[in-house]
Image (spheres, grey):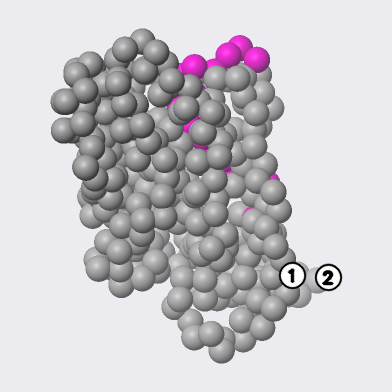
Amino acid sequence: MNHSTRRVTRVARGAVAAAVTALAMGVLPATAPVAAAASHHRTASPIHQIVLQGAVNVRDLGGYGTYDGERVRYGVAYRADALNKVTDADVVALGRLGLREVVDFRTPFELQYDGPDRLPPGLAPTSRPVTDSGLYTQMLTAIGSKDPATQDAMLGHGKAEALMRTVYGAFVSDPAARAQFGATLKDLAAGRGPLLLHCTSGKDRTGWLSYVLLRAVGVPEATARGDYLASNTFRAAADAALRAGLKQSGVMQNPDLLIPLQEVRSDYLDAALSQLTSQYGDLYGYLTRGLGLSLPDLAALRSHLVP
């Protein structure tokens, strides 16, 4: 293959990547030429969990099928819960991933309370705090009160669910949150992977950006939503153990009040998407005007994550 042919091939691939990305975000009409490839879309492979002793929600974002029949590469983008409790063996396992960047969305209060990440030698976390709209503080305050009436007043009667919807709306409406999310996607677009992104539980801030990332590279909505909801499976045992411990110790009479805070739910994700639609019209508007990604950034993101 001569230089001219290689250049044409690169240009063609870039054009297809940009078109697929636009189609996935609803920017192009369904009759766009690239849509023909959608009939060859393959079903998503099982989620690839990174099994650690000190973190339960660590996953590779690779393996998902795209609209044009390709698959997201394994080993480029990872999602996780906090890494402050990982064991020495876990640190070795993380080292085998060849990570070049670990992005921590936890706030200073969360870091102070839980402690910093434990990472392989030579790898320091990139701190990009994203607001949780007071979720962590409210949960700790309710638990710390040890008073059933106070806990019910703070978390019961739909208040926990309402707080979660507020949290998700802020992922879109808060300028600082958009800046942190945008910077992380730009790092991936610039080829700074393998990159791991995480927050405390690896389900809300991490879940939202993972959803956005998958959609941005051409993964269908239902598939990206499935990855988001899978946190409930990976976190179920640890979350149930926490509730059981709180009840056994007498700290909470009704620890099930925590379930809406521990879970991910479609209506939480929909709260963010509703804010996105209201503020930016569609995902493309959010990515470009909200997160500051250019069309070349989006094409580069796709080319790094999809063969």
Quadrant placement of the C terminus: bottom right
Count of numbered marks: 2
Residue 289 visible from this viewpoint: no
Residue under numbered circle 2: 1
Residue 202 in the image: state x and y as whole percent.
46, 36
> Quick one: label 1, few (<14), some, or many (20+) residues within 10 Å?
few
Q: Are marks 1 and 2 in contact (CB under 8 Å)?
A: yes
Amino acid beneath label 2: Met
Q: Name above or below for residue 169 compared with residue 12.
A: above
Give the SS element for disc 2.
Answer: loop
As measured in the structure, the alpha-carbon distance from the residue carrying label 1 to the one carrying label 2 is 6 Å
Residue 234 in the image: state x and y as whole percent.
56, 36
Tell which of 220 and 151 is nearer to you.
151
Magenta segment boundaries in residue numbering: 72-89
Q: Name above or below for residue 147 compared with residue 80.
A: above
Give the SS element for disc 1.
Answer: helix
Q: Residue furthest bottom?
A: 31
185 horizontally vs 55: left or right: left
Q: Say the numbered circle drawn on residue 206.
A: none
Amino acid beneath label 1: Arg
Residue visible at 32% across and 56% down in the picture = 272
Residue visible at 43% across and 32% down in the picture = 201
Residue under numbered circle 1: 6
Tell which of 106 and 49 is nearer to you.
49
Q: Sequence order check: which comes first, mark 1 or mark 2?
A: 2
